[in-house]
Image (cartoon, helix red, strand yellow):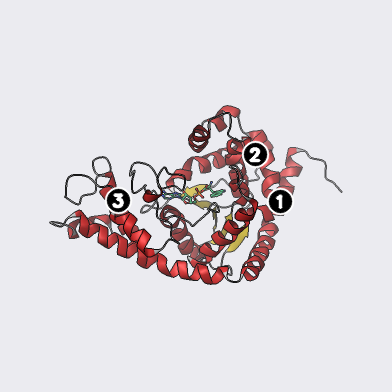
Amino acid sequence: RMRVLSGMQPSAESLHLGNYLGALVNWVREQDEYDAFFFIPDMHAITVPQDPAELRERTRKTAAQYIAGGIDPEKSTLFVQSHVPEHAQLAWVMMCLTGFGEASRMTQFKDKSAKQGADNAGVGLFTYPMLMAADILLYQPKGVPVGDDQRQHVELARDLAQRFNSRFGETFVVPEAFIQKGGARIYDLQDPTSKMSKSAASPNGLINILDDPKVIAKRIKSAVTDDDTVVAHDRAKKPGVTNLLEILSAVTNTPVDTLVASYEGKMYGHLKVDVAESVVAAVTPIRERTEQLLADPAELDRLLARGAEKAREVSQPVLEAVYERVGFLPPF
Ligand code: TYM
């Protein structure tokens, strides 16, 4: 079976709707079709300052949300990045293959370092995409299901795989970003030209899937739209309404055109009520199941330990081949 791999950062409060619709929903579908590896990039999480106890909690909470959202640890290999030392080991090799200019062009680095002031940004933020390339290439996946914002990072992983292969001999599968149509980019409700992100200026633009349904509904109902009243899909002229339509389309699995037709002659208020109801209906069972799973952290840790064992069965031989090809002397 074809292999896929993906991950999402352990976030403080909850996954947001972009993570859910841009990634998790697809992972759940893909685990039936593919040999799927899903992991929690906790090493990526320390590229910005973290509280240690909180990071541990975030990691468990993210694992719980994967499972609550439908990832079955029996079908998929589910693990934590820092449990598999090969990620850090291969990342070094990837850094040595990457050009300084090439890394400087990564838009996520440019955005994040601009926010912190370029001189204050950690070097980890700069080398983040090389760690991500290692995450991917260690498992030889054909597809990397991600939202549109991660496309450039997957491109870098492709380039590095090709570069390594041509310099040292065929070693890596060259991966491809799998980006689905609906939900590939969910925008901020208050600033619908920026992607929904936990680092947004105002929390009101964000929908956390573990939030109280009242908060979710309130944020959707106060989403920015425009002065016009016609419900139409037009990214340039009506970014707010378009975002709501795309959210509704992804959550209810209904084509946008069908939705637009059904709102003919109706006002934005109707659309907002429907979006709020559908989103709450989709995330409520996930929140409840996450709470149940978090009540037994030992069981979660056991599942993750088992996942790391399965992951290492793949990552160890790949790293060994890499070490041999770059010319490291075997240790025994
Ligand atoms: P992260 O944690 O920022 O996001 C996790 C997933 O959610 C998607 N996503 C969105 N999709 C639609 N609309 C949005 N507003 C939105 N915001 C986020 C992302 O595209 C992603 O699929 N660097 C990665 C994590 C990572 C990774 C990897 C992913 C580390 N190593 C290896 C794949 C393979 C990240 O920070 O994603």
Q: Quadrant of the N terminus?
A: bottom right
The answer to whether marks 2 and 1 mark residues whose Cβ atoms lie closer than 8 Å is: no
Disc 1 packing (10 Å; few <14; some 14–19; many ≥20): few
Q: What residue is disc 3 on?
A: 223
Neighbourhood count class around disc 2 (C-alpha, 10 Å): few under 14, some 14–19, many 20 upward: many
Front residue of 270/2: it is 270
Q: Write the residue at 63% across / 67% down.
A: 303
Going by the image, does 313 lie left or right of 120?
A: right
Q: With respect to residue 310, does 48 lie above or below?
A: above
Kindly identify the amino acid type of the residue bearing the numbered disc 3. Answer: Ala
Task: Please indicate, yes or no, whether residue 126 appears anywhere in the rendered image.
Answer: yes
Q: Is the residue indicated by label 3 positioned so its CB lies within 8 Å of ligand 1?
A: no
Location of residue 294 by image quarter: bottom right
Q: Nearer the viewer, residue 209 or 44?
A: 209
Give the mark nearest the N terminus, 1 or 3.
1
Give the spatial CA distance, label 2 vs label 1: 15 Å
For the residue pair 18 and 179, the one nearer the viewer reads as 18
Mark in the foreground, 2 or 3: 3
The amino acid type, in three-letter code, at marker 1 is Pro
Rendered residue at 71%/51% (across/down): 85
Q: Earlier in the sequence, mark 2 or mark 1?
A: 1
| Residue 1 seen in render | no
In this rendered view, identify the residue nearer to me: 30 or 186.
186
The percent position of residue 16, horizontal first and vertical second, equals 44, 55
Give the image location of residue 327, x and y in percent.
77, 38
Q: Which mark is residue 94?
A: 2
The spot of residue 33 in percent (x, y) is: 49, 64
Q: For marks 1 and 3, give the CA distance.
A: 43 Å
Of the residues shown, which amino acid type is indicated by label 2? Answer: Met
Report the residue that reaches farthest toward the right: 332
Mark on residue 85?
A: 1
